[in-house]
Amino acid sequence: MKNLSFIGLLLLGLAFLLYYMLPQFSFVKLFEPINLMGILAGIGIGLIIGGIVGYVSKGTALKQEEKKRELIQLRKEKEDLEKQAAELARQQTVNYTRTDETKNPPNY
């Protein structure tokens, strides 16, 4: 948005410079109705274009942020599932070891 504002001010300055370079330049003519209409139309068009660009860029940023949140949530769920699987595997190996010892007691 800052870049759009900068470009808008730059273009406004360029328009004033071009108007100033006219041979029949005067500050009084700057405030005639036809010139004021041109200035206001330019500002209005700039605001409309700036609003559309801002809306689109904000929507894109929100979508990217939502994707980041989903990715973080999926990674967290994956880590939890891996921990659960490791714990389950550890418990199963402990159970197999205990049952094998009770079925076949060592000979002394």
Image (cartoon, grey):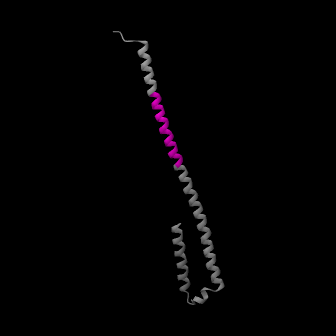
At 57% from the left and 59% from the top, the residue drawn is 58
Can you name the residue that lies furthest to the top here? 108
Q: What's the residue at 43%, 14% (across, down)? A: 102
Q: Is residue 57 magenta?
A: no
Whole-percent x and y of residue 76? 49, 42
Query: What x and y, as percent, mark residue 10?
Result: 52, 75
Residue 76 among those drawn in magenta = yes
Q: Is residue 71 above or below residue 85?
A: below
In the displayed structure, does residue 11 sit left or right of residue 104? right
Q: Is residue 93 above or below residue 107?
A: below
Give x and y (percent) for residue 64: 54, 53
Magenta span: helix, strand or loop, mainly? Answer: helix
Pick the residue in front: 78 or 24: 78
Indicate the position of residue 103 as horizontal and vertical percent values: 43, 13
Residue at 45% of width from left, 28% of height from top? 89
Please report the residue visible at 58 percent of the width from the left and 57 percent of the height from the top: 59
| Mark count | 0
Q: Residue 28 sits in which quadrant? A: bottom right
As drawn, the residue found furthest toward the left would be 108
The stretch of residues the image draws in magenta is: 69-89
Relative to 6, does residue 31 appear above or below in the rendering? Answer: below
Toward which corner of the image does residue 108 lie, by quadrant? top left
